[in-house]
Image: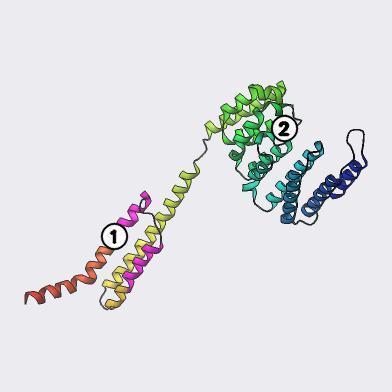
Amino acid sequence: MSSSGTSLAHVRSCGSVCSPPLSPSLSAMFSMLDSAAEQLMVHKDFQAAFDTCNRGLESLATMEQEDNRCAELKAGFCILGIQALAELNQWHGVFSWVLQHYEHQEKIPAKIMQMCILLYSKVGEPAVLQEASRAWLQCLSNSRAAGFGTVAELYLLHVLVPLGHTEEARELITGEVGSCAFTEDQRQTALDIVDEKEQENQENPPCNPDSELVAQIASTQGSVIHKLEAMLRLLYRRLLAPGSGSFSLRRVFLAGILLYMLLVRMDPALPSSFMWISKLLQLLKQMWSAMFAPYYQTLTQSKRL
């Protein structure tokens, strides 16, 4: 990748019929782009590659935009920066970083939109790109871009269909975006895919992750409650048995129960906590009566005498 970038910079510096010779500032930018590619692909120094891309983009922002090669450089730095952030597992900030340099999401090049859609789909967060992709596709100037059809296809297959937005998917296919992006055969194939996905959702409705999590927590807490209840009852019987221990042992056990209540951090507002709290309160009342009732009775008798 580095060698191909160097040869490309050399050809452009020699000049051609289409492009004028590279200025010293542009030559420096192409060299910086080669360095970022080498750091990313050869040395696997992803942080250094991202820092180089940032410096290149900052330098481009202060330069006069000579021709379309400045736009190519900007896109090249962004593409390498996206790969570096993905390797650093910092994909959360990829699109905001891209938007920082392009300001408006409609101005983002098609190749970068494609990379962002694929990245967020890969990490299971396609909804992050839904609004931005919709706005990009609805921009009339982007309909003439070379990668417009690919962006529309990725948006359909990797955002709308996985999210189950079948109505919006049909509108995309049959609307103005679909007529610009797809052929008639492609539109029919896309509609078939959407229909198949809708039928699959009807037969196997997707589960709510929150409900699954609550059920799992409730099940876990239920098993813990039964085990803890059995343990408390066993210890309670041991404490009530003759010669089982002194009053200090009972106080230590009671203190342990109170510390457990403080450290377990159980939310009393959860319905799954009601059974646990009521059972624990009942056991504590029984233990309190067993431990302190004899002393209250002795104290009461002494007062009567």
- Local crowd at mark 2 within 10 Å, few (<14), some, or many (≥20)? some
Q: Quadrant of residue 155?
A: top right
Residue drawn at point x = 74 percent, y = 45 percent: 62
What amino acid is found at the position of numbered circle 2 in the picture?
Answer: Thr
Q: Nearer the viewer, residue 173 or 139?
A: 139
- Range of residues picked out in magenta: 252-281
- Local crowd at mark 1 within 10 Å, few (<14), some, or many (≥20)? few
Q: Nearer the viewer, residue 301 or 108?
A: 108
Residue drawn at point x = 63 percent, y = 26 percent: 172
Question: For residue 150, which numbered disc appears in the image?
Answer: 2
Residue drawn at point x = 87 percent, y = 44 percent: 9
Sequence-wise, which precedes: disc 1 or disc 2?
Answer: 2
Q: Is residue 145 magenta?
A: no
Q: CA distance from mark 1 to mark 2?
A: 63 Å
Q: Position of residue 170 (x, y in %)?
A: 60, 25
Q: Position of residue 296 (x, y in %)?
A: 16, 72
Q: Name the residue beneath numbered marker 1.
A: 281
Determine whether label 1 and label 2 are within 8 Å by CB.
no
**Main SS of the magenta segment?**
helix
Q: Quadrant of residue 132?
A: top right
Query: Can you say which quadrant of the picture contains the C terminus?
Result: bottom left
Q: Could you tell me which secondary element the residue under label 1 belongs to? A: helix
